Image (spheres, helix red, strand yellow):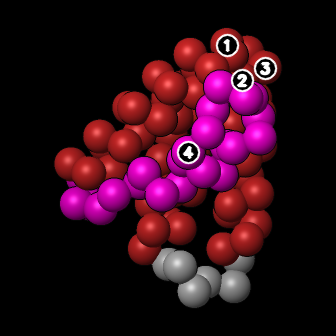
Amino acid sequence: MDAYLEEELYDLLTYCIQNPDASDYGTKEDRIKEIGQELFSDGGVDALENMYFSIEHRIREEISKDAKPYRSLWNGISNEWSY
């Protein structure tokens, strides 16, 4: 399951980074939040950290952009996750 979520999250973040003014941007952000909830339910904060670490590096290497600002979309899932 995590592999599918990783690919979906990568696609969503890449889309949001490259299309900040798109009409469906909010829908994409909502799905990013849902993925965070799913990951947390399955593996806690460690799952969030591991997934985001992987995604951040992929995005930096593949499209030379920074995904760190999107970490805050998962704020509120857990008190331990605060960016």
Cα separation, mark 2 vs mark 3, equals 4 Å
Residue 43's disc is 1
CB of mark 4 within 8 Å of CB of mark 3? no
Q: Is residue 78 left or right of residue 80?
A: right
Left or right: 51, with 75 as reference point: left
Magenta region:
62-83
Q: Position of residue 45 (x, y in %)?
A: 63, 20
The x and y percentages for residue 48 are: 58, 27
Q: Residue at x 73, y 29 (%)?
A: 79
Q: At numbered mark 4, what does the secondary structure look like: helix, strand or loop? A: loop
Around disc 4, counting alpha carbons within 10 Å, would you say few (fewer than 14), some (14 to 19), or many (20 or more)? few
Real-space Cα distance between discs 4 and 1? 19 Å
Q: Secondary structure at mark 1?
A: helix
The residue type indicated by label 1 comes to: Gly
Disc 2 vs disc 1: Cβ atoms closer than 8 Å?
yes
Q: Earlier in the sequence, mark 4 or mark 1?
A: 1
Q: Is residue 63 left or right of residue 70?
A: left
Distance CA(mark 2)–CA(mark 4): 16 Å
Badges 3 and 1: C-beta atoms under 8 Å apart? no
Instruction: Count the labels in the image.
Output: 4
The residue pinned by badge 4 equals 83
Q: Residues within 10 Å of mark 2 (few under 14, many from 20)?
A: some
Q: Quadrant of the N terminus?
A: top right
Give the residue number, with chain letter if any, for mark 2.
40
**Disc 3 secondary structure class:** helix
